[in-house]
Image (tube, rainbow, N blue to C red):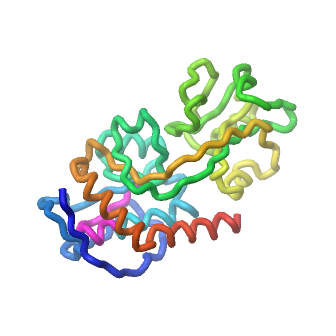
Amino acid sequence: MKLKLAVSVYCLFTYFLIPQSEAYTYANSSQFSSSETNLPKEIVVASDSAQNEGRAKILLPIAQDIAKLLGVNVRYYECPWARCLKAVEKGKVDLIFSVFKTKARTKFLHFLTPALATHDVQFHFLVKKSNQIEIAEYDELANLTIATLRGNQYFEQFDQDNELDKFAAVNYQSAVNMVLNNRVDTMIDLSLTPLKQRYSADPLHRLKTARYKPKEGIDEYIALSKNSQWGEHSELLSNVIKLLADQGTINRYFQQVAALESEN
């Protein structure tokens, strides 16, 4: 499929939280010319209702840039992360941001290229200081109960280990509470989690990070539901994202993310 990209120069959008009831209208303002016709009139983007501050708040307006280039409208669908994944799997939502690629997810998602960013991610196991639990290597997880976040994927060895005693929490605060209330021994966390969020969930700093910290390079993507109205337009959307990347637009958003996270 040959796509002709029109040159576009436009400003970054300011990043304000967009309620589910609001939509951005770009009909008939397309700056993107392609051989495709009959595109859907609207693109629906998952907005994790528990993460609408900071990082997510900065990155979600990329959807407005995509919609403007295509000349379609954009609407945000608020949902907890696990429900967002279900919605995109069923095709109720078209796009979901900041997704890590896994074999299981490729069954229902197109991972649009190029990736938004590549991260060197450490996986942390948080334990209660007073419990004196030490985790120095992977094998020591076998004797512990572990809280995860529902819908999240971590590193392959951990994700595929069905012998581990894992319990899915509905959100980050719930996972922290499970550890603090001795319902589980530890929880798995990411080095990408802002310290502000961790300390907000554990204001008395009763948790510590265990010594075992596996590390992995992970690409962060915008993903498209294979079951959505846009499912057959993955190549078109990838070309739009490539244009935004080539123009430096995506990098400028991530510079804002880096500045914010350095403050926290």
Magenta residues, start to end: 66-78
Percent x, y for residue 42?
Answer: 24, 61
- Of the pair 223 and 50, the residue shown nearer to us: 223
Residue at 67 percent across and 54 percent down: it is 197
Q: Can residue 118 be seen in this view?
A: yes
Residue at 77 percent across and 52 percent down: it is 203
Image quadrant holding the C terminus, namely bottom right
The magenta stretch spans residue 67: yes
Image quadrant holding the N terminus, namely bottom left
Q: Can residue 180 be seen in this view?
A: no
Percent x, y for residue 26?
Answer: 26, 72
Above or below, 99 against 252 in this view is: above
Residue at 70 percent across and 68 percent down: it is 263
Percent x, y for residue 6?
Answer: 25, 75
Above or below, 184 against 75 in this view is: above
Percent x, y for residue 186?
Answer: 72, 33
The magenta stretch spans residue 109: no
Residue 237, quarter of picture: bottom left
